[in-house]
Image (cartoon, rainbow, N blue to C red):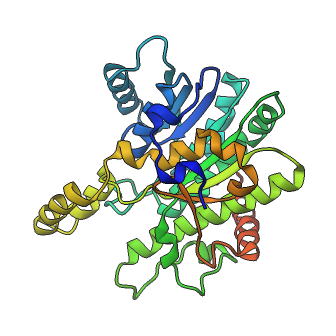
């Protein structure tokens, strides 16, 4: 499985010209998202960095420019997005559609990992899944319109994780209580809740692909695993266990973990590699792992009944809170 690029993928050489393409990458002011924006903008795309903090976004854009985002390449713009609040996520999608007439690629990259949450309203399920669902669904009308244009290649990509395989087999999404499951008694409760959000993301992508296929909409929907990447989020998680674990992690990460620039390869491959569109039947609804190859997901992630259950409960929860 995986086609030509399964043997290796280098964005510098394997991406097409992206001039005229409009892309959104959420959470792109650091880590994998930052690297993905850099890869895409260097091939001519107009990329929106969708983040909450304008100061950090502007600093990241300045860094991109200093590292080679010169005139003649693409451009990077900031879009306000706070995934801690689904109402703001909806407003952000509406704001974008007032600014742009097309959207070719959406990469849902923003994600809380396991670092200590400093904002009390930042719930990991809200950020990683629920608000991302709202933001994506808000942009679907524009994505559909773009997909009807000649020679279009519209894609939706979500950065998930192979960790979705670790979710207990009896997991369901029948009510808000299931969304709020805290995995009490588990050895790593925060990690368990994190992996649950990764399962939710994959299920959402698969169900969205099924619904678009049923409508005859030629949008490709994919989820990806970036692999083991030495990001700020992972570093912060290691720091939370104390100085010994932090030092141990630093030694291991420098040897075994990929840099964010390499970790972004799966996202960028899914978003823009020509082989994906050329083999649409093989890739649509798929799960990409390094080195840019199709991979199987867990039995639960492949369950269309569970995906439908998640979608319907999500809509009910959002309706109950007025989103």
Figure check: 233 above or below 48: below
Query: Which quadrant of the structure image shows residue 175?
Result: bottom right
Figure check: 69 above or below 240: above
**Quadrant containing the N terminus in the rendered view:** bottom right
Residue sitting at 72 percent across and 27 percent down?
102
Would residue 103 be found to the left or right of residue 183 on screen? right
Would residue 55 be found to the left or right of residue 20 on screen? left
Figure check: 229 above or below 161: above
Residue sitting at 52 percent across and 54 percent down?
6
Can residue 110 be seen here? The reply is no
Figure check: 281 above or below 197: above
Residue 250 % position (x, y) = 17, 58
Outermost top residue: 71
Residue 124 % position (x, y) = 47, 62
Residue 291 % position (x, y) = 46, 54
Badge count: 0
Residue 316 % position (x, y) = 75, 65
Residue sitting at 81 percent across and 52 percent down?
212
Can residue 30 be seen here? The reply is yes
- Return the residue nearer the eye: 202 or 98: 202
Outermost right residue: 215
Residue sitting at 26 percent across and 57 percent down?
236
- Return the residue nearer the eye: 179 or 41: 41
Query: Which quadrant of the structure image shows residue 207?
Result: bottom right
Would residue 13 be found to the left or right of residue 64 on screen? right
């Amino acid at each position: 499985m995986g086609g030509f690029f399964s043997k290796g993928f280098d964005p510098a050489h394997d991406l097409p010209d992206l001039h005229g393409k409009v892309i959104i990458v959420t959470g792109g002011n650091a880590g994998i998202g930052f690297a993905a924006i850099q890869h895409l903008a260097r091939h001519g795309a107009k990329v929106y960095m969708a983040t909450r903090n304008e100061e950090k976004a502007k600093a990241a854009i300045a860094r991109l420019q200093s590292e080679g985002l010169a005139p003649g390449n693409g451009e990077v713009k900031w879009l306000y997005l706070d995934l801690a609040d689904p109402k703001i996520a909806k407003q952000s999608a509406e704001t974008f559609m007032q600014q742009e007439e097309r959207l070719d690629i959406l990469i849902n990259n923003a994600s809380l990992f396991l670092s200590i949450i400093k904002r009390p309203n930042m719930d990991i399920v809200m950020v990683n899944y629920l608000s991302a669902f709202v933001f994506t669904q808000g942009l679907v009308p524009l994505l559909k319109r773009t997909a009807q244009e000649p020679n279009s290649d519209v894609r939706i990509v979500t950065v998930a994780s192979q960790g979705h395989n670790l979710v207990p087999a009896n997991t369901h999404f029948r009510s808000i209580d299931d969304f709020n499951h805290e995995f009490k008694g588990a050895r790593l409760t925060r990690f368990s809740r994190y992996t649950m959000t990764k399962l939710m993301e994959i299920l959402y992508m698969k169900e969205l692909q099924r619904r678009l296929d049923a409508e005859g909409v030629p949008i490709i929907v994919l989820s990806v695993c970036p692999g083991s990447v030495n990001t700020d989020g992972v570093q912060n998680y290691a720091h939370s266990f104390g100085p010994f674990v932090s030092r141990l992690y630093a030694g291991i990460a420098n040897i075994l973990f990929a840099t964010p620039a390499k970790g972004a390869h799966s996202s960028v491959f899914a978003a823009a590699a020509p082989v994906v569109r050329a083999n649409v039947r093989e890739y649509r609804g798929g799960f990409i792992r390094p080195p840019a190859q199709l991979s199987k997901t867990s039995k639960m992630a492949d369950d269309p009944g569970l995906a439908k259950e998640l979608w319907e409960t999500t809509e009910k929860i959002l309706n109950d809170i007025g989103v």
